[in-house]
Amino acid sequence: MSVDVLQSRGDEMSVTVCGQDENVERCQDGLVKLKNAEVEQMSKDILYHLGFDTNSDDLEKLFGDVKHGIGVPSLSILLVEIIKLLYHAKAKNPVIFRIGSSGGIDVEPGTVVITNGAVDELMRPFFEIPICGKLVRRPSEFDQNLAIELKALALPEDNFQTKVGKTMCATDFYEGQGRRDGAFCCFTEAERIGYLDKLKNHGVLNIEMECVCFGALTHFAGIKSGIVCVALLNRYNGDQISVPKDVLQEFEKRPQALVLRYIRKCLQEKNQNSS
Ligand code: R2B
Ligand code: URA
């Protein structure tokens, strides 16, 4: 599981207007703005989990890719610090990608899924988080143009399919994803299939454990973002991930390959514009 940060300094990359939410804006100058005035008042800012300190590190020079653990708590900490890193680094028009693995719903193992919408286990398209004792909901939204652009980078010679669709975000890998192979199971095979059918009818192509939070926080920050995950199995055929290690390793390279093509394309366009 990793998150790639792509930024362009100077030249504008495409600016897409985000959603209806009045709190959400993508700034004209392309710079990342924080929705927290407190940060500007701080004499230094420690990005604890990234290991950066605005006094001793040159954040304008630091970029790359970072790995997160499993699930929303691990991702949300990382994303908050990445958004602050982009702010301190004065990044312009950044694009954040999450690349990883997932369980497919009626798709061939090895299929690459580009997320164009995220829902939770109850098919709700927002990230709900208790803040100071109150439940706050933030809509999870994805840049539709980016999803289309990524799909267009799938090549006829790729030995796998690339699809665009919704992704379901689960807080649990086992029962929460309708798995019957965990330490606990309180539902029948018919209920498992019924749940997969429900997800499928809702346009869900795959299940992972971070998308709702990822779409919500990047959207709230006004930052363009995308998720590209490979499906390790077709959940209609079972729960266990039984693909051999070498196949698994090859599957995991597929989302990286697609996002790399996008990064290359952006860099080529940037070079053409500046020459
Ligand atoms: C996909 O795979 C991980 C669980 O195995 C989780 O991080 C996710 O979203
Ligand atoms: N990751 C998940 O969260 N679920 C799967 O089924 C496979 C990978």
Image (spheres, rainbow, N blue to C red):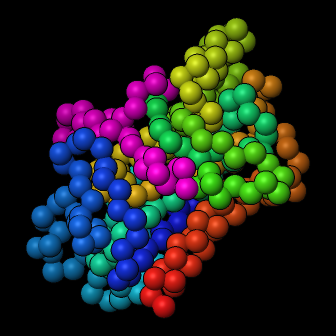
**Horizontally, is 234 left or right of 214 in the view?**
right
**Horizontally, is 258 left or right of 176 in the view?**
right
- The reply to whether residue 95 is in sight is yes
Q: Which part of the image, by quadrant, shows the N terminus? A: bottom right
- The reply to whether residue 85 is in sight is no
- Rendered location of residue 131, percent (x, y): 23, 41
- Rendered location of residue 71, percent (x, y): 51, 45
**Which residue is painted at 68% across and 37% down in the image?**
103
- The vertical placement of 61 against 6, above or below, is below
- The vertical placement of 189 against 219, above or below, is above
- The vertical placement of 39 against 127, above or below, is below
Which segment did they paint magenta? Answer: 121-149
Q: Depth check: give the residue in front, 178 or 155.
A: 155
**Which residue is painted at 46% across and 31% down in the image?**
120
Q: Depth check: give the residue in front, 3 or 43.
A: 3
**Which residue is painted at 67% across and 25% down in the image?**
179
The magenta stretch spans residue 8: no
Count of picture labels = 0
Q: Where is residue 253, by image quadrant?
A: bottom right
**Which residue is painted at 46% across and 32% down in the image?**
119
- Rendered location of residue 165, percent (x, y): 57, 37
